[in-house]
Image (tube, rainbow, N blue to C red):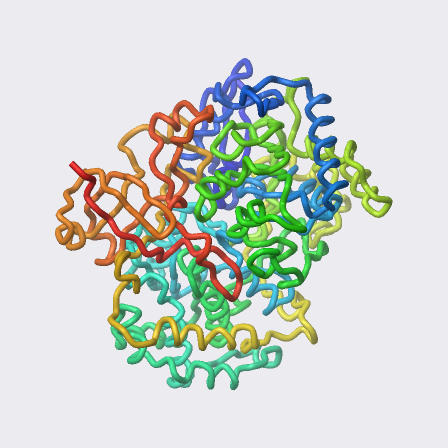
Amino acid sequence: MTTHQHTCPFCEATCGVVIETRDGAIESIRGDARDPLSRGFICPKAVALRDLHEDPDRLRRPRRRRRDSGRWEELSWDAALDLAAERIDAVRRDHGPSALGVYQGNPTVHNLGLMTHGVLTLRALSTDNRYSATSVDQLPQMLASELLYGSSIFMPVPDIDRTDYCLMLGANPAVSGGSLMTAPGMARRIEALRGRGGKLVVVDPRRTETAELADEHLSVVPGSDVLLLLAIVHVLYSAELVAPGRLQPMCDGIDLLRTAVAPFTPERVAPRVGIAAADIERIAREFGQAPSAVCYGRLGVSAQRFGGACLWLVNAINALTGNLDRAGGAMFPTPAFDPSAFPSSPFGTNRSRVRGLPSFAGEFPASVLAEEIETPGDGRLRALLTWAGNPALSCPNGRRIEAALPQLDFMVSVDFYLNETTRHADVILPPTAPLEHDHYDLAFNLLSVRDRAKYSPPLFERQDDQRHDWEILAGLLQRLELSPTQLPFRWASRVSPRRILDLGLRAGPFGLRRGLSGLSVAALEARREGIDLGPLQPRLPGLLTTPGKRIDLALPLYLADLPRVEAELLGPGDVTASTDAALPLSLIGRRQLRSNNSWLHNARSLIKGPHRCTLLVHPDDAAARGLVDGARVAVRSRVGRIEVPLQLSDEVRPGVVSLPHGWGHDRPGTELRLASERPGASLNDLTDDARVDELSGNAVLSGVPVEVEALAG
């Protein structure tokens, strides 16, 4: 029996695991009590590491799809990479570099090799047509970080282990393990918060698992969070609770912000928000008077019509009360490997060809992917490279994306599953699985509630007929036609992620604090459970890269969005969850403990038990429509229709329905046997690619107008 210490890569919690193997097979997986961050905690997803490693549906060798017959055939690695490079080069020669698009999925940030070599590949390809999961998730917070602090990766996280008061909007960390807040074992952390006399207030249209643990749950009308946040800022000013403290000398726009929020009184916004004015006033005062406090907003406030304004206000509330960059507030982690030296394009550098939506960090919103393929003319997207992504299920109006992908001249996917998206590829290049390559959390150490560093070597050696993700991307770069200015990226791609990581650790902020050799991969290999680098420390103003190292809390971009807030949310009309009379209900998503987007539904240990792709409907809404618990119902939106089992629940407020994300495994031509046995229905067959946050370009996944109807017969 051999014992290994590793990290679960299936969500942002990054829990430490102990894996025992015998004769090359996994015997057991349990939480690692010595891990400095997770301290023995794991969730059911960690056990699925074995399912994924042993999955017979996982692809091991490259495949080519014959377009004339639709049949797949296996290729050697050299033949597959040669074909992919040849076809990509042909498109780029004939139509320009931006005729090639790249889509990066969520698992990219869980993969060391994709993080290091994905950047090299994107820079070498020099295409403007880049897309990722960012714009269906956290783009508003990254934009706020770029504009307020100077870099999109400077994202403050709740110092949850030391705070006295946490105001949480649109987040469910008891299930997610933290999101833009790496905090495994969140239930224990909430218990500790309350045990020391602190308070947790959760604002969400659904009484989530986190809300059940909180001191108070406030049920908000979906999409109205921006009004609640504006009213909280209003009260902070009117109650004279604005006290930036040591932040005062580095903050601009404090007086201008007071004027901007003046119209948004608790009394005025309360009917639209669905929360009593007295409660809004009380929450604001409690926050401003707490010894330490933190406001935290996640996907529920990010992926909505005013996501950009919401995340600006979340940051402003923390700054105005002096809770930004102090213990118990919103703090900036200090990663041992600091990627901030890699700049990205400023917001709005480019505009998408068809709709004119702004780019962020060199990427266009994923909501425009289909139209950029469908629409003729110069600059049309003609070829697509995807890695670790499934936009057919993960992006708004997924059916439209599915219909657009066959219109491409060529598509290549780096993925170990033949799934709803990769079934349209001409070539699939399957990488090794998580336990077959090394692991270090480049992304999530930027978001951790405690500084730490941990490196995990592979448990299993890759076979001769396998390739790691970074080796696949490097193989493409060795074959693609590149200009002289792009050749350095080809040469750099030959360097392993382990070597890049080692150089970054030695040059990083902790590189000289661990003996003469500094923090290095070798030092981390000697401490497989990881090294605790201590609680988060203040980093301002040194962290700032804005002009003059200043934080402008009243940026014109955000102030200019407030008239839209007034017009859409405070105009005349009845107060309802949806303003569309034909689609009177408001659809929100739902995070589940035994699921992560679309890529874990082929794991037997996770899909067993009751079917979980159900539509939560309040009993009052069901009674008004003659719907009964357990019946299959039709749900329709402007762009689509699905059928799904109904589950009566008073977790959701009247007028709101909830469906989990990532399901819909009923497409023909996939090879996901377990997932297809329980396909569920895709939330993104209902979300609307025409609905985006006009300020940031982020997709609107929360507050989608729908109607629910009984099936005929």
Q: Residue furthest front?
A: 376
Quadrant hosting residue 281: bottom left
The number of numbered badges drawn on the structure is 0
Q: Is residue 68 visible?
A: yes
Q: Is residue 483 above or below residue 587?
A: above
Percent position (x, y) of residue 351? 62, 60
Percent position (x, y) of residue 501? 70, 42
Q: Is residue 510 above or below residue 254?
A: above
Quadrant hosting residue 678: top left
In this view of the protein, which residue sits in the foreground, 474 or 160? 474
Q: In screen coordinates, is 360 left or right of 323?
A: right
Q: Is residue 328 above or below residue 621?
A: below
Q: In screen coordinates, is 322 left or right of 548?
A: left
Percent position (x, y) of residue 315? 50, 68
Q: In screen coordinates, is 86 left or right of 487?
A: left
Question: In the image, what residue occupies the spot 29% across and 80% down?
Answer: 267
Question: In the image, what residue occupies the spot 53% across and 68% down?
Answer: 326
Q: Residue furthest right?
A: 484
Q: Is residue 88 above or below residue 373?
A: above
Q: Is residue 34 visible?
A: no
Quadrant hosting residue 387: top right
Percent position (x, y) of residue 40? 44, 38
Name the quarter where the C terminus is drawn.
top left
Question: In the image, what residue occupies the spot 43% across and 55% down?
Answer: 299
Question: In the image, what residue occupies the spot 33% across and 72% down?
Answer: 283
